[in-house]
Amino acid sequence: MILGITVSIGSGKTTAAKLFSKYHFNRIDADEIGHELLKSNKNLKNKIIKDFGKEILGKNKNIDRKRLGDIVFNDRNKLKKLNTLMHPLIITEIKNQIKKIQNKCGADAKIIIDAPLLLEVGADKLVNKVIVVKAFHENVIAGNKHFSMEQFEKISMNQMPLAEKLKKANFMIDNTKDVNHLKKQIKEIVNKLNQ
């Protein structure tokens, strides 16, 4: 059973995805894969530096994700260019991790793919069921520690609208209340999947 969990930015997707581990789901984190690729894939790193300039480098000569984000979230064409470089590599690594988990735990291993752009990049083709996490816009902004309000709005504009994501969802998690409410919904989803 492979689940995909997605969301609008900052709605608590990763918290929800981690709660599935209680039910023996192995989590694959697309964001972590992307961050690791920026550090470890020399070809990718060199292409991004060539396309976006040396000003995206931090003190340690690694790509500074915030600097890169400032560039791409202000220019749709540059974001498209970055996504064209990153997304195929992320999907390949997700497939590799699925294989590793299935080799270790068996073909029917429980896996959850935690990916903000699951639907946008077609990674939903890798999963049996799609879960969309929903939260109030104000709560999302208040709980967000990584981005300014302006960055938050720009990132949101470049994602599929929540209403569109919900149309493609097999399950919806309402993350507008406390963690116990979140846990209860995850338990209900797991029970439905086990029926």
Image: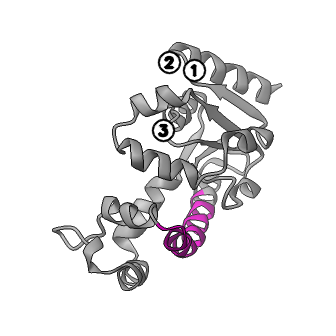
Residue 166 falls within the magenta-colored stretch = no
> Could you say whether the residue bearing mark 2 is in a helix, strand or loop?
helix
Q: Residues within 10 Å of mark 3 (few under 14, many from 20)?
A: many
Give the quarter of the image for residue 3: top right
Q: CA distance from mark 1 to mark 2?
A: 5 Å
> Could you say whether the residue bearing mark 1 is in a helix, strand or loop?
helix
Task: State left or right for residue 1 relative to residue 26.
Answer: right
Question: Compared with residue 35, is residue 44 higher up or lower down, i.e. above or below?
Answer: below
Region rendered in magenta? 75-97
Task: Kindly identify the residue that appears in the image at 53 percent across and 29 percent down.
Answer: 19
> Could you say whether the residue bearing mark 3 is in a helix, strand or loop?
loop
Task: Kindly identify the residue that appears in the image at 54 percent across and 37 percent down.
Answer: 13
Instruction: Of the two numbered discs 2 and 3 on the same chain, state the one appearing first in sequence.
Output: 3
Residue 83 falls within the magenta-colored stretch = yes
Task: State left or right for residue 39 relative to residue 92.
Answer: left
Give the quarter of the image for residue 45: bottom left
Residue tagged by mark 3?
10
Which label was assigned to residue 182?
Answer: 1
In the rendered structure, are the residues bearing label 1 and label 2 in contact, judged by CB atoms less than 8 Å apart? yes
Task: Kindly identify the residue that appears in the image at 51 percent across and 33 percent down.
Answer: 12
